[in-house]
Image: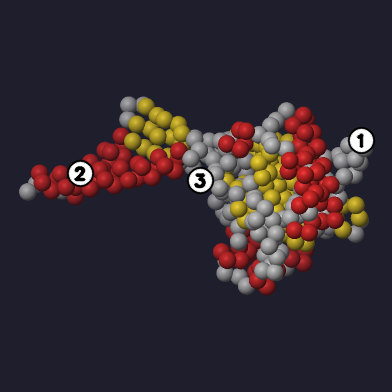
Amino acid sequence: MRSSSLLLLSFFIGVCDVRGTSDFRICAFNLHNFGESKTKKSNVMHTLTRIITRSDVCLLQEVRDSKEKALPHLLDHINRYDTEHVYKAVASERLGRSDSYQEQYVFVYRTDMVTVTDQHQYPDNRPGDIDAFSREPFVVRFKAPKTAINEFVLIPQHTTPANTTKELDALYDVLQYVRRMWKTEDVMLLGDFNADCAYLAKKNRKNVRLITEKSLSWLIGDKTDTTVRSSTSCAYDRIVVHGEKFTRAIVPFSAKPFNFQTEYRLTEEQALEVSDHYPVEVVLKNATYNVSFSGGISLALTGTEQTAVQKSFQSMFFSLFLLSHLVFQLLTQ
């Protein structure tokens, strides 16, 4: 009787087969002065590795790797930790107005999930506003065929606190520049914008086109705390999306900080050794969610339909299994 029930269950599963793919995650993380000295702290490197390998593409900021040793060490650590994927990185040149303090933007990505199709260092020479940024954006275009968006552009920015309002407004010019250059509407701006508290006064927000432009969606809200210190509560780190198609490709309410202190049970002191910021993350919808029926009929779903369909079929399979079990019990009595 048990084998007959299992046979019937196999039949139902064969009639309707549901397949989905895992979430595609993008993150932005200010590593707070990441250099060679930080790589020598094994506990810090382990936590950084766990955080970064949560995502398919992760923007790293405040990378201060003057000897070009810290980033290779981090990549090696990441690839030894997560053997299911191969990670690579694409990095900007060292940026900053002062020779004594410079940073790099670094994108760490899974090679089986995305391909870098283009990269561009923004020249920051706009007439009338030359040198608007301390660390001008390093723009990267990715192809991600397993996502609903397929291809997108990421514009990173770590603003200078004393110049936050001007740099955020100038980011709007960068967006227009990238749209024209690559003829795309699917753009995400992300990073430590310092877009809150004392660095961005409420009275100045009306002067920031990146905020006032209605075609842009700010996914991290103003009341969200992206800082580690318990003494602060500021939404410094942000994710902003341009393009209707890109906006639709975002899993609703998935944009949020990742509180690694709570997740990994660290004290505040231990967490601050890693960074004084939480990474901010967002999840993209899968390209398709295939439901295949016997006879060659298939249905491709996208977006929020995926989870509902999966749960419905799981419930249906369980109900059918119980029903088949009861039927065979009656037949064999």
Is tag 2's residue or tag 1's residue first in the polypeptide sequence? 1
Is tag 3's residue or tag 2's residue first in the polypeptide sequence? 3
Q: Amino acid at mark 1?
A: Pro
| Of 77 and 301, the residue lying toward us | 301
Q: Is residue 61 visible?
A: no
5 horizontally vs 216: left or right: left
Query: Element type at marker 2?
Result: helix
Local crowd size for mark 1, using a 10 Å CA cut-off: few (<14), some (14–19), many (≥20) = few
Tag 3 near tag 2, CB within 8 Å:
no
Q: Residue at x 28, y 41 (%)?
A: 10
Report x, y in % for residue 84.
55, 51
Which of the labelled discs sits on residue 22, or is there none?
A: 3
The residue wearing badge 1 is 127
Q: Quadrant of residue 65?
A: bottom right
| Of 81 and 321, the residue lying toward us | 321
Q: Quadrant of residue 233?
A: bottom right
Q: Residue at x 48, y 40 (%)?
A: 304
The residue wearing badge 2 is 324
